[in-house]
Structure formats: structure tokens, C-alpha cells
Amino acid sequence: MNITTFQMTMTVVNTACVLIVVAYILIRLGDKFSFTQRPANWREFLVLSGIFGGFCLYAAFNSIRAFDAVVSLRHTGALVGGLVAGPWVGMAAGIIGAVDRYLQGGPSMVSAVLAVILAGLFAGLYVSYVKKNRMPGVWEAVLFAVVYELFAGLLTLALVSDWDLALKIEQNVRLPLVIGNAVGVGLFIACIQIFVREKEILKTKNQIESELNVARSIQMSMVPNLFPTFPDSKEFELHALMRPAKEVGGDLYNFLSLGNGQRFCFMVGDVSGKGVPASLFMAVAKTLLESEARASEGLDCSAIMARANNGLCRGNDQSMFVTVLLGVLDIKTGVVEYCGAGHMPPFLLRRDGSITHLNCDAGVALGVMEDMPFQHQQITLTPGDTLVLYTDGVSEAFSPAGTPFGDDGLAQALAVMTAADGVQHAPDITRGIVAAVDRFAANEPQADDITLLALKYHGTPAAATLATAEAGS
């Protein structure tokens, strides 16, 4: 049968492509061992030798006879085994292929058997001693396969007793073998490199996720999260929650007792941006605001904001900023002094069920420019009144239709909760708002951090009794 060089080339290239598909599937499924390192024990040695030897046998199954020779890609399995897993795996895979080639006989049997064994051995030695156990690149592997196939041709010329027959074989079959084995080895190494990069990317991704989870835990531990925070205080109750849109966020809330327990400071803030930079700036802002609030004896809210702003502006090379709403409650009188720095005003829920936005000078966000003036305002809470502070992650939540929840949606949610048998506790308000936002957004991803703080004022026991009597009359 007359088989042209072109036909043989197409046959061996087709075989090479099939081998690569099988190899890629094995690579992706081979989670019990690695194709990219030397076998660590006998089990791995036997498994890898069997896999690459199996490639040799598959290539032999698709071999064709031409000019008294057997044309196949046995060398591909042995070469890749050596290049990837070292000389012993390469030689073992070659021996598996050599046994099959020996059984087929023929005038070139001896040279062919020796060539397939030496293919894996030489490839492994090249990687071990020349590459220092580093995997070769694609083109380097292709060049190695080409050079080795030329060497295999010399073996045929040297070991086949009939010189004319040997020359005829080489003239007709060596080029297809060079092309086929070079394609097979090159594609296989390319698959290995893709697999290695995927593993490295996955490893890096998992490491980043692990670090972000730690950062999230640290960030969440930076804000008070044990409620009730002041269980012995009967004059007020407070609840706050924060749900970052990403692993870490830029929102903040905080509260602390001032003036020997006579005053109570609370705040909510929203840092520009998201992710790790925002979370770091959030930590700095929270710490600075708390420090200035603790040192604020005799100072009003606007002075606290001004001093915190100057501290944030210094060294702020990234030009980040944070909007803040900060308030101080006089526990005995119910007077709340509050100051805004670019933040939306809070909602006020009166005990009679009315809901209003507080008047609030918007001001400039902290960190924008030093020595900026801030204005504070006052309001007096009566027993049963509640302040609700929030960030724009609440109002800017979107429905599947693209409609924002908005301040109107928040006011409506508060009205529904107030009308439903009366909301008696601060946690009911914060959790109820989050539930309303989730229902509104359905399955839409959270676009921004959500932070809420509810402060419900009960007043002194005498004031609370009077308020209850007035409500019942």
C-alpha cells in the first residue's frame, strides 16, 4: 500500500491531538497526584509511569505500517514522561511502549525499541541536570523533541542491517515522526503550563480570600458587636449592625460613654470606595474619632469633627474621605447634639408614630481639606423617641428593575414597623430595615456596605412614667 508522507503526517498529528485531549482531562482530574513534580513514592511512580506508558500504547494502537516500518507517536508519551516526571518515569513509560514495539517485530524493531526507551531517559536527564528540575518551555520542549527524533533516525541508520532499507525508511517516515512528536510534546507541555498557572492563580486566590476573611474578622471586631452594650442603662437602648458588600468594607459605627456616664456618643460613617483601602481608612477614621471624642470634655460635636478632620487630612496621599454623622446624647435631659460631615441626616421616630428627617447641615466629608468649619445642631428626645442613623448602602440598594430603595423606601419601612403593634426595641428596627431592603432587592447583589444604628431613648424612670401616662390619656 502506497502511503504518502502527507497522509502519514496527518495521521500522526491527529493522534497527537487526541493524546492531548486525553492528557488535559487527566491533568484536570488528577487531584490525587501532580503531573508537575517528581513522584514522591512508589504509588505515584507507578501511576505516572502507567499514564505516560498508556500514551505510548495508545499511539501504538493508532500506528500505521509504511516502508517496512511502524509509524507511531510512542516517543511522545516517553518524552513527556521524562520532561515532566523525571528520568525513571520517562524510562518506565518507554519500556511499556518498547514491549509493544518489540512484539510487532520488523527490520527496524531493535532501533525502535531502543529509541522509545532512551526517549524517556534522555528527556528526564535533560530536565534533571540541564534544567535543574525546572520544566522546559513549550518551544524548548518542541526543539528537544525534534533533536531527539533526528537522533532516533541515526539509530535506525546505525542498527538496521540493510542500509538501503534503513535509508528508505528514514527518507519516508522521519519527517512525519518529527512533526507529530514535536506537536504532541509541545501541546502537552502547553497544557501542563496552563494547569500550573491555574493552580498558582487558585492558590493565590485562596490565600487572598483567607487573608480577606481574617481582615473581615478583624474589622468586625473593631466595632462594638455585643448587645446590649450597656445592660445596666435603663435610660436608652441601642443596636447597630454592619454588612459589608465585599469581604471588607468602608462603613463604620461606634459608640462610647463620656463624662462619667452622663453623656453617650454615637456615630456612623461611610468611607469613599470599597474593599481593603476603604477598610484601612475606616480603621484610622474610627480610631481618630473615638480618640477625639474621649478627649472632648467641654467641646461640642463640631469641634470633635474639626479635630478629627485635621488628623485625617495629614498624610492622606490617596485623597480618601469619610462622611460621618456624630451625635452626643445627654442621658438625663434627652438633648442630642449632632453634627454632620457630608453624611445623610438621620431619621427621627417620635413616640406618637411620626417619622421625620432631622435638619442637618451636610458639611464637608472628613479628610477633604484641613481647617474646615463644621456646624452642630440640637434636638431633644422625649421618652419613646428613636434616632435611626444609616449609610447610603441602605438608600442605594436597587431592585431587579433598577429602582433605588431610597429614603422614601426607608421611611415607608419605618412606618410599617412602627404601625405593627409598635416597635419597642432598637434591634427590631435595624433588623427590620435590613429585611425590608433584602425583600426590595430580591436576588440583586449588594452594591454597597449597609450600616445601621438605632438609638431609642427611654429617659429617666420618672420621665418614662410621665410619657407613658401622657400616651394613654
Image: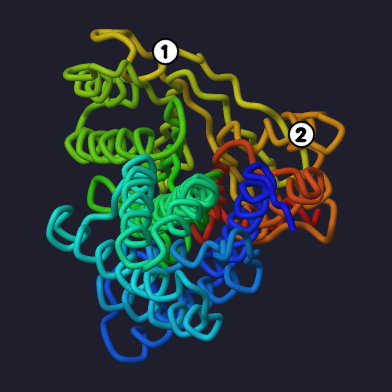
Left/right placement of residue 366 relative to residue 470 reads left
Please give the name of the residue rendered at 22% of the width and 59% of the height, measured from the top-left corner.
Answer: 127
| Residue that carries the numbered disc 1 in the rendered image | 364
Q: Position of residue 416 (x, y in %)?
A: 83, 48
Say what secondary structure mark 1 lies in.
loop
Residue type pointed to by label 2: Phe
Residue type pointed to by label 1: Val
In space, the residues marked 1 and 2 are separated at their CA atoms by 25 Å
Q: Depth-wise, is mark 1 or mark 2 nearer the camera?
A: 2
Please give the name of the residue rendered at 37% of the width and 55% of the height, measured from the top-left corner.
Answer: 153
Please give the name of the residue rendered at 58% of the width and 72% of the height, measured from the top-left corner.
Answer: 60
Local packing at callout 2 (Cα closer than 10 Å; few below 14, some 14-19, many 20+) is: many
Say what secondary structure mark 2 lies in.
loop
Query: Mark number for residue 6?
Result: none
Left/right placement of residue 315 relative to residue 232 reads left
Q: Quadrant of residue 59?
A: bottom right
Q: Quadrant of residue 444?
A: top right
Q: Considering the image in quadrants, where does the N terminus appear?
A: bottom right
The one of 277 and 250 positioned closer to us in this rendering: 277
Left/right placement of residue 351 relative to residue 113 reads right
Q: Quadrant of residue 316?
A: top left
Q: Position of residue 34 (x, y in %)?
A: 39, 71
Q: Position of residue 69 (x, y in %)?
A: 55, 65
211 up-or-down from 409: above or below: below
**Residue 10 seen anywhere in this rendered image of the structure:** yes
| Residue that carries the numbered disc 2 in the rendered image | 405
